[in-house]
Image (tube, grey):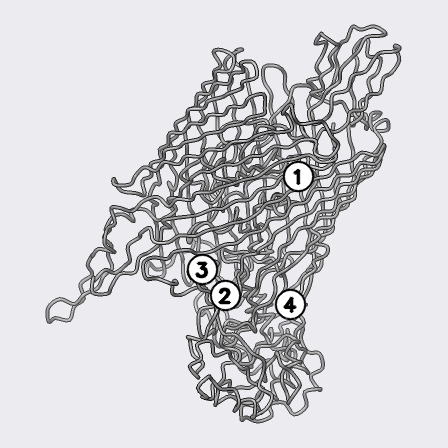
Amino acid sequence: MVFFCSRITINGVVNDETGMPIPGVNVIKKGTQTGTVTDFDGAFTINTEVGSTLSFSYVGYVTQDVVITNNSNLTVTLAQDLAQLDEVVVVGYGTQKKSVVTGAISGVKQSELEDLPITRVEQTLQGRVSGITIAANSGQPGSSSTVRVRGITTLGNNEPLWVVDGVVVDAGGIGFLNQSDIESVEVLKDAASQAIYGARAAAGVILITTKKGKSGKLSVNYNGYTGISSAARKLDLLNATEYATLLNEKSVNGGGNILFSNPASFGEGTDWQNVIFNDSAKRSTHELSLSGGNDVSKFYASFGYTDQEGIVMSDISNYTRKNIRLNSTHNITDKLRFGQTVGYSNEKNIGIGNTNSEFGGPLSSAINLDPLTPTVETDPILSNQAPYTNNGIWRDSNGNPYGISSLVAQEMSNPLAYKQTLLGNYGWADNFVGNAYLEYEPIEGLKFRSTLGGKLAYWGYQSYTPVSYLNAASITTQNNISRGTNKGFGWNIENTVSYAKTLGSHNFSILLGQGAYVDNITSGENVTYFDIPVDNYRDASFNFTVPTDQINASAYTGNEHKVNSLFSRLTYDYDEKYLLTAIIRRDGSSRFGANNKYGFFPSFSAGWVPSKEGFWKENDVINQLKIRGGYGVTGSDAIGDFQYLSTVSGGRNYTIGTSGSVVIGNSPDAPSNPDLKWEETSQLNIGFDTRLFNDFSVAFDWYKKETTGILQSVTIPGYVGAVGSPTGNVADMENTGIDLEIGYNKNFNDFNLSLNGNVSFLDNTVTFLGNGVDFLSGGATIQSSTYPITRTQVGQPVNSFFGFKTNGIFQNQEEIDSYVSSDGTVIQPNAQPGDFKWRDLDDDGNIDADDRGFLGSSIPKVTFGFTLNLDYKNFDLLVFCQGASGNKIFQGLRRLDVENANYQTAALGRWVGEGTSNTYPRLTTNDTNNNFSNPSDFYLEDGDYLRFKTIQIGYTLPTDVLRKYGVDKLRIYLTSENLLTFTKYSGYDPEIGGGIFGIDRGYYPQAITNQIGINLQF
């Protein structure tokens, strides 16, 4: 950091190396406070003389003393001080100096997020913070991500608690935020820091603080960018000639006839991926903010607009968002302060329907449709024959019908025709999120604060379904228009009293608080009109009168969820050398009965800074060292309402008497469980923070997290007569891991270098599932698999892939006959050469369900990120990479029950004779060996990847040029997003979220985007 001070004797101005004024710089004449720059003008008055000494200091930099030798311009250079960098971090209900923090807290600041093409707040953390696993749920614009803090915590809801300016926000609704409004994002990773949020903190806590105004002149900032997106990769699918050749072979191997006499005559055929992917999808964002104020009032206001087209059929895949925000603070008196934050967003999302599903939609259809079918049938003879004579056939602008496959049906349909059925459909959401506080400080250090916050949300959809004939399995004979509207409200009130005091070298603070939280105040209505007198979505309306039997309507009202809390925190440090934090919170939830309504969540953490001890000699190797550790307990009540009661529901049909009439009655759902109690997660964390060789910073954490009493349904015997199953505390789980963050910062005159990396290691294990229960039945399924593809079992990671293990391919009959169990039984007597050799895990001479085993985990064992920042004069470069490894992906792209679905080109390497393949079995219509229908390691691939997420080059115009036009800053930049991805995975994208990681059913891939942007400040 370089300060240029002009004629410091009177009205000096402190500027940075670009000529921009710097707020918050302390300028001290030895022994006397002479001025602090607190506004953007940077003006202050110093009365000094030649020979005096001025001391310049700034947060994050080493204080510099300067002796005044003359009355001319002065240049002051401050070295970066990593010990003080980002010295204040946000914790629950306040802030703390980073040097005295004893918990495991990581985060990102506004300076790290500027100008990045981030649509949703989850993306701000991916690869930038250790201990957190993030995977996009879809590449569909506006889609959320799956976020897991230090692994999978429970068998139910694993979403972390999101707190925006003190308001608890549901994970699905976090998309209302505009990333340019974010001041900081902190992740509370260990129980020692999470316990202040007690009941809902078990899966982690993410605190988001939005920007506030600063004193000084009005500051206006504009940031905007626009660009083009395209598909990063496409699957290698069979062309028409290859497809016809393999179908001929498949038919003959199954005992059938040749289907196509001349496969080569089909040529390349239809590339359905080219039909659905848009290589010039537009994307743009515009953000404008104003801030300013004085000693009494400060404000920050912003406006944002985002418009993004999807790369898959953009007509039915796009997202828009509009944002407005106003934050302000006011000093009513010297002791009384008032502040508020409020944000509004409007979102409109048009989606393709299925973004990771094998049940149709553009992606799944493009993968499975045969390349023999044309996109449009132009033959006048064929286009006037079945099936093109059916009612509801879709045609292009020339009147030609869109091609309908005679080989591939069910949910797989021509994407061009399918698109017509979704035009005019959209989802929408309006979100109002805000809070207001009143703070009174009667004496220095003692603060009383009351905060009222809440979120009001409206959301819904509108759709029109026309009469259509997509294929013999997808027919709509009656049109309809449908609309759904929902309202949700949640609020909280928190009252705290805090006191902070310094007595010599003793520093302590205490916080006492009370909170009340109510959410799920919801209601909604849905209505559908059938057979309205229109034939397109533009004319569709609810203003038409239809018979009552053509109207379907429903409504609902949610059950309020209430939590009442008391909490306290004590912090103490002696000379920032010996550190202590203790927290306890008591929560009561409406989801538990009188026996266990309240839960207690304590935590304790301590730290020691040996580098401050007298015996620690100053050296150039270990400049600073802080050792810390903590233990705490957090909880979860993430279950349905009234699970502790035996609730009664209707709709139970029973025939009484001899008349045969059915009586609709009511009966209990499940036995009550008055002892139902809180799910608890305890966590031990040990770590250290250090600075090495003056330029390196290292943060290390080891943790062990154990969840006990996981809330799950309890299986009860059928003779009980209950329709449902009660909920109980019946499972335990454990996560252990290591988080490591390393930073390097160095200035070389005009060249500044910053390197920051992080890596996290995770091991998840299920330790208990109930007395006598080794595994949970069921698991994730995929269409046409014979068995579930995942299993949760004691001793294994949750939702591990489970299936058959291959042992090569039988090359001849001799190998089949010689494949025997320990007692000499031929294991697969009905197999044929070219079939998989299945491992007989139980050695019983037979391949059945008992021969399934664990095939790998979908949870990445390692996640990592790396950021490089280079500055040279007015040029800057950012390179950001992130990735994961140690996980498997189930590649379930091809529908096995759609007999003639297309194949990827890997099928060209199938077994066709002895020695031709030992990994891809023969193709046949009579797969008696279940080569493809068995879930097996044949479908599992390594999910490792390294992605160059963001590469950005920028140039800032010289200040002396801009000042002539009243401009403080003008920066132009070019950004590439997802430019390169290194992976061996054969699907579209190795980053697959959606609750259970790593099951690819036709995943909407993330796009490559190239953009140009501008940042302008006045």
The first of marks 3 and 2 along the sequence is 3
The first of marks 1 and 3 along the sequence is 1
Secondary structure under badge 2?
strand
Residue for badge 4: 986
Report how far apart the C-alphas of labels 3 and 4 lie in the structure: 30 Å
Q: Which residue appears farthest toward the left when viewing the image?
A: 657
Labelled pair 1, 2 in contact (Cβ < 8 Å): no
Secondary structure under badge 3?
loop
Secondary structure under badge 4?
loop
Please tell me how crowded label 1 is: few (under 14), some (14-19), or many (20+) other residues with Cα within 10 Å. some
> What's the amino acid at mark 1?
Val
In the rendered image, residue 249, in percent from the top left (x then y), is placed at 61, 88
In which quadrant of the rendered view does residue 848 lie? bottom left
Residue 675 versus residue 174: which sits nearer the camera? 675
Judge depth for marks 3 and 4 and give the one in front: 3
Labelled pair 4, 1 in contact (Cβ < 8 Å): no
Residue 325 vertical position relative to residue 991 in the rendered view, above or below: above
The first of marks 4 and 2 along the sequence is 2
Q: Which mark is residue 795?
A: 3
Residue for badge 2: 801
> What's the amino acid at mark 2?
Phe
Q: Quadrant of the N terminus?
A: top right
The first of marks 3 and 4 along the sequence is 3
Report how far apart the C-alphas of labels 1 and 2 lie in the structure: 36 Å
The first of marks 1 and 2 along the sequence is 1
Residue for badge 1: 698
Residue 299 vertical position relative to residue 645 in the rendered view, above or below: above
Q: Is residue 419 shown to the viewer in this render?
A: no
